[in-house]
Image (cartoon, helix red, strand yellow):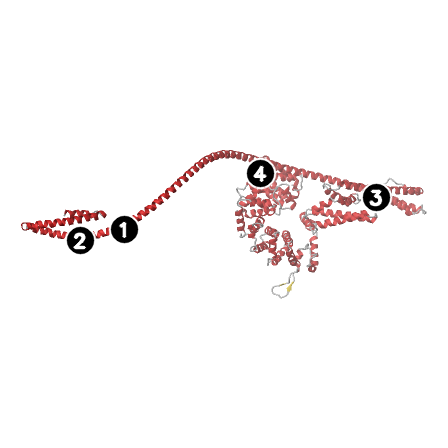
Amino acid sequence: MDISTSLKSLLLAIRQYKNNRSLLNASQLQKQIEDVSALKCGGVLFSGQVLPSECLSGLMEVAGDPNSSHSLTGTIISLLAQFAAFDGETKEALYNSYNFPGTLAAIIHCNRSTPEEPLVLQCLNVLQCLTYNLRTVNCISHIHELVSFLMQHSTNDDILKACLGLMANLCRHDISVQSHIKSQSNVKAFYRALINFLGHNCLTVVVFALSILSSLTLNEEVGQKLFNAKNIHQTFQLIFNITVNGDGTVTRNYAVDLLVDLLKNPKIADFLTKYTHLPVCLSEVLGLLHSKDPDTASKVMELLVSLCSVPVLRKLVCEAVLRPLAPRLQPGTRKAVQTRGSEPSLALIHWEVIGSPLCSSAQSFVELLLQEVLLLIQSPDSLEGDQLLKKHCLRAGRVRLSPEVCVSQVELLLSYSQDLTGSSCSISNYQLRQVCSWVVLKTLELMSHLRQQMPDMETSFYRILQDQRMVTPLSMALTSSCREHVQIALRILFEAAPLPDFPSHVLGDSIAANNAYRQRDGELSIRSGSSAGEEVSFIGKSFPLIHAEPSETASHSIDSLIEKLQNGVEEKVKDVHMSEIIDVYEQKLSALASKETRLQDLLEAKALALSQADRLIAQYRCQRAQAEAEARKLASLLKDTERRREDLQTELNDQLLEVERLKSDSQQLLEHNGRLQAVADQHQELKSTYNQLLTRTLEEVAEKERQIKALKTDVLEKTRNIADLQNELRRYKEQLQEMEENIAILRKELNKTEQARKDVSIKASSLELQKSQLEVKVEKLEEELSKHTHMIAMIHSLSSGKLKGDTTANLSL
């Protein structure tokens, strides 16, 4: 099955699937995608034609549909990723014309809740490939959601490498992405996670983390701590180790990019100049130039160019590249063996040594350089494929040619041609002007071919095209009789005509002047030819054979004319000057030849116009297809916008309800505020009352304190009195003790008295006389006893009532 039929079948399957998303249609579409993938028709798919463009737009729409199955979406992504890896033009078309990264970001956004799905990992890997070395990513839809997803799942082991690699691509050059990351609330946790990844056992993860940290924190406090003088040498060693012994080409590329970005910081570049192991690391890096991988060699050269941007390191790089290697001893021998084929200079044949003090050291391997150059510029076999031939042409076309050299060359030629125009109108000056114009046009053609491969070449090319002095070479080439000159001038004019400052009117006037000059020159030549023809006809009256066959074809008539002329002159006319007749017919022959040339040029111009018309038709079809693709893309964006508008409308309604709720809450808050104000007024009144009460209380406290002082004074007095009373009490106690002793004595005496009374009662009769005496004596004793009793009562009143009973008892006694 040919490519056209496969694409038609694919487009039909896409339309059937859009109309009915059944499993049968999905399987048919998946089968058609696999068939197209097997054909390897990337060049046809991205040719800009209508059918391939519709197929690609349909595939994008199906892949971006959330309702499509993961299997079908993964098949589409695999096909487009295969084409993206085909060449740079296809990758650029997928990015700019079909917004493939936006589709991938939308798929990741739809599956953000299931990051472990294989489809998410596939989209992340393809996005990493598409965004590598991309200067800006603002055109990618869902870019902020994608960045948030990457920050959230940067610790997920299943998608760790893909997340970090994509994050390194997104935040390397885009300031908006960097600002968005720094504005996130979890940015500090993200920084800590990246710093922890620096100790990871996978070198790819380490270099990804370092790249992200350098892009985000190099000019901040975190970056200054991370890349300070203590840590930077370890960082250099790590980067060089990854570059030399990395896990693969991808890891090596990111390591080189990281070092290139770090060298843009003057402080880090100064640290690298002081790195002691740099010569050894540089020699190991130069050893990678002998690898057969062109991407590795390209990255090494990019690193060397970046190192040469630092003036101090430029000399070191030159010495490492141009210095011949020291002879090495073979094992088991004492003889030195010179390894001629291992010099890094042989792999750097485009390296400039002109103007360098080490230029003389390059003389020793000039022959080897020439051999390498011959091998590189040798065209590959056409049987090896168009891709290898295209790669060879691109490699051979990348020479050391700067836009400044081209501009200076064209400026010099235009100035010289203008000086020749103002000088004498000699034939030599006219020829020099033609040569200058031709060189200018060839230089512009070279610049046109190189404008996409070299920076600033396109700007210089269009600036020269708008120069007023370009009128002379263009008009001379457009009115030239050389087919190649006209074609080159038309190609350049096709590029220059749309420019705003291109002098089209002046060019038209110059072309008209050249045509008028040529017409006058032709008329003069015809007049001279007619006068000579009259002379020949006058002479030819005697020679009728000369004009015998004027109606035959040009070549036959010219040959017969020459033959007749020679025969007629030799046989019949011996007295006519043969040279004059030959001059006349040479003029006629030249006129016929010029007419034939003009007709041939007209035919070629017609053919060129037809080819241009075909090309314009093809371009129109391509533009129409692109416009339709853009229209479909805009329709999809419109649908997204409408859906987003509905979401925003819903959100707006929610916000309005929220505003109403906030109004009611505000009213409640105002009422509550009024109540609080009343409470505050009441509190103020209570505060004033409290202050009054506090003042009164303080006065009362002061009065109480004065009373307390007085009471203290009274207490002291009473304490002294109590002490005096206690002394008196002790005396009374002593006296009481004495009295108790006396009482005891008295009791004994009383007992004796009682006994005596008994004796007396017994002897009453005999003692009646003594009774009166004893009564007197008893009365005296009673008086004395009453005195003692009174004293005991006083003592008892001062102490306790213990002795009251005793006293009473004594009294009773």
Residue marked by disc 1: 723
- Return the disc, 3 or 2, that comes first in the chain's sequence: 3
Q: Is residue 778 above or below residue 681?
A: below
Q: Do the residues bearing badges 4 and 3 touch, measured as CB atoms within 8 Å?
A: no
Q: Which residue is the extreme one toward the left?
A: 765
Q: Secondary structure at mark 4?
A: loop
Within-10-Å neighbours for mark 1: few <14, some 14–19, many 20+: few
Residue behind mark 2 = 741
Which residue type carries mark 2? Answer: Glu
* Helix, strand or loop for disc 3: helix
- Mark 4 or 1: the one toward you: 1
Q: Quadrant of residue 685?
A: top left
Which numbered disc, 2 or 4, marks the residue that appears first in the sequence?
4
Image location (x, y in percent) of residue 131: 61, 46
Query: Which of the two labelled residues, at mark 4 and mark 1, occupies the earlier sequence position?
Result: 4
Q: Amino acid at mark 4?
A: Asp
Mark 2 Cα-neighbour bin, 10 Å: few <14, some 14–19, many ≥20: few
Residue designated by label 4: 65
Which image quadrant for residue 356? bottom right
User: What whole-number distance in Å separates the C-alpha atoms at marks 3 and 2?
Assistant: 185 Å
Residue 128 lies, in percent from the top left, at: 59, 46
Q: Which numbered disc flags the more N-terminal residue, 4 or 3?
A: 4
The amino acid pointed to by label 3 is Ala
Give the residue type at disc 1.
Ala
Q: Position of residue 408 (x, y in %)?
A: 73, 50
Label of residue 593 in the image? 3
